[in-house]
Amino acid sequence: MYGVILAGGSGTRFWPLSREEYPKQLLKIFGNQSLIQATLARIADLIPLNQTYIVTNPAQAEQIKFQLPPSAEGPRFISEPIGRNTAAAIALAAIQLRKKFQDGVMVVLSADHFIREPQAFIKALQLGEALANEGYLVTLGAKPTRPETGYGYIQKGKPFASQPNASTVQRFVEKPNRETAEQYLKKDDYFWNTGIFLWRVSTILAEIERFLPELSEGLKEVDRKLGTDQEGEALGRIYPKLPSISIDYAVLEKSDRLAVIPTDMGWEDVGSWSALDEVIERDGDGNILTGNVVNIESQNSIIYGDKRVIAVVGLKDIVVADTDDATLICAKSKAQEVKKVVAALKLRNGDEHRIHRTVIRAWGTYTVLEEGRDYKIKRIMVNPRSKLSLQMHHKRSEHWVVVSGTARVTCGESVYTIQANQSTFVPMGVKHRLENPTDEPLQIIEVQSGNYLGEDDIVRYQDDYGRVEAKKG
C-alpha cells in the first residue's frame, strides 16, 4: 500500500492559530504531536515512510519538513502549484505513483483528522486493501455519535458475501439539517463520510478518465514530463487550469464500484474551533481552557491562549482564541464562519491571515517586534550549529545587534565573529550570511531599512535546506 496524505489546506476556520504559511495540520492541538505528525504515526506500522506521499504546496512542504525527523526514507512530497481541490490532488498523486510503482493500493488520508481508536482504523484499512485489490473504490464510514450537520453521510447498501463487514454504497448525502441528522442517528445504515479512501492506482485513474475526462486529459502532458527537466514547467502551466472539484462530487457519487467499511474508530474532522468539544476533555462547566486563562463563571466555552493573561467572566458558548498579533471572539455556533474573517483580512492586504508574528524556519525562528514605513524590527533566534542561507536583498539594508550568543557573519568578502553587545551592518545589495557556530542559541535584533521590506526580496546563493523559492532566511 501507498499512503497519500492531503495537506494543502490553510485551515481558515482555525484562524488565528492557523495561517496560510502555518496551517492547521502543523498545530499541536491535542498534545505533543501536530496533526500531521499524528497522521504519519497512525499509519507507520502499515505503510513505510518511503511509500508515503504528502500532497501540499511548496511553502507548506517546507514547514512540514521542519516537523519531521531527518530521513532519507521519506516521506516524499508532491507539490501542487495551486490548490485545485481533492480530485486534482488525488489524480496528481496517482500518476506519480503509477510512474514509480506501476500500480498498487492508495490510501488517501487528510492531514487534519482525529482518530480515537487507531487499532480499529488499521483493521479497517486492512479490510479496505482487500476490497481495493478486487477493483472497488473504498471509503471508511464512521459511526455517528451525534446529529452532526457539518459532515456528509453515506448510506450503506448490501453487505458483501466475501466481506460481511463491508457493504455496497446506497447513496452519498450532503450535509443535512438538524432534523434529518437526528433521523440518521436513529438508523443503523448511515455513517459519516470520513474522506478516507482506498483504491488501486489503476482503478481511480480509470474512473477519473470515465467521469472527469477534462482532468484526465489535462494531466496527460504532466504525466509525460514526470521525471524530466520540463516537469515543473508543465505542472505550473497546466495545473491551474484543471477543474477544481472534490473527488466525491466528481467520481464517487457517480461510480458503480463503491464500497463502504463502517467503523467505530472515534473519527472526527477537526474542521473548526467548535470541533474541539468532541476531542478534548472539558471541565465541570463544559469549558476547554488552554494557556494563561482566568475564568470566572463561564460555561461551554473554548478559551485558547498562550502567554498573555486571558480573563473571561460569564461567557457561555463562546470561542476566544488569542495569539501575539490577533484575537478571535465568536459564538461557538458561528465557528464555521471564521473563514469569512480570513477573507476580510485578505482584502486589507495585511499579513495576519498569512503568517504569525513568530515564524518557524529550519534554522530557528524570527519574530516581528515592530513595523512601520521603511523599517521593520525583528528578533532572530538561530539554533545551535545552524545558519541562514547565503543571500542578498535588493531593496533593504540590515543592522544586526547580538543580544546573546556568538554570531559568525559573512558580509561581502569578509567573514568575522561578533558577540553579545556587538553589532554589524549589512548594506543593500551585498551577499551576507548569519551563522551560529556554537552549541548555545544565538539571539539577535535585526533592524531592516528600505522602501520595500517584503519577505520575497531575497536572492539565495547557498542554502543548507534545499530551498529554491524566494522566502526569508
Image (spheres, rainbow, N blue to C red):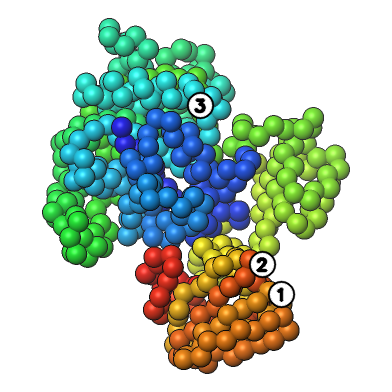
Q: Position of residue 283 (x, y in %)?
A: 77, 32
The quarter holding residue 278 reads top right
Q: For this rendering, which residue is in front, 249 or 423? A: 423
Q: Position of residue 21 (x, y in %)?
A: 49, 60
Secondary structure beneath disc 3?
A: helix
> Mark 2 or mark 1, which is nearer to you?
2
Mark 2: amino acid: Glu
Determine whether label 2 and label 1 are within 8 Å by CB: yes
Q: Which of pointers 1 and 3 lies earlier in the amino acid sequence?
A: 3
Q: Which of pointers 2 and 3 lies earlier in the amino acid sequence?
A: 3
Residue beneath label 3, please? 118
Give me the residue at 56% from left, 57% from top.
341
Give the left or right position of residue 111, taking residue 251 as reference: right
Residue 281 in view of the camera:
yes
Distance Cα–Cα, label 1 vs label 3: 45 Å
Above or below, comparing residue 79 to residue 319 in the picture: below
> In the displayed image of the protein, which residue is found farthest to the front?
438
Q: Which of pointers 2 and 1 lies earlier in the amino acid sequence?
A: 1
Residue beneath label 2, please? 440
Residue beneath label 1, please? 404
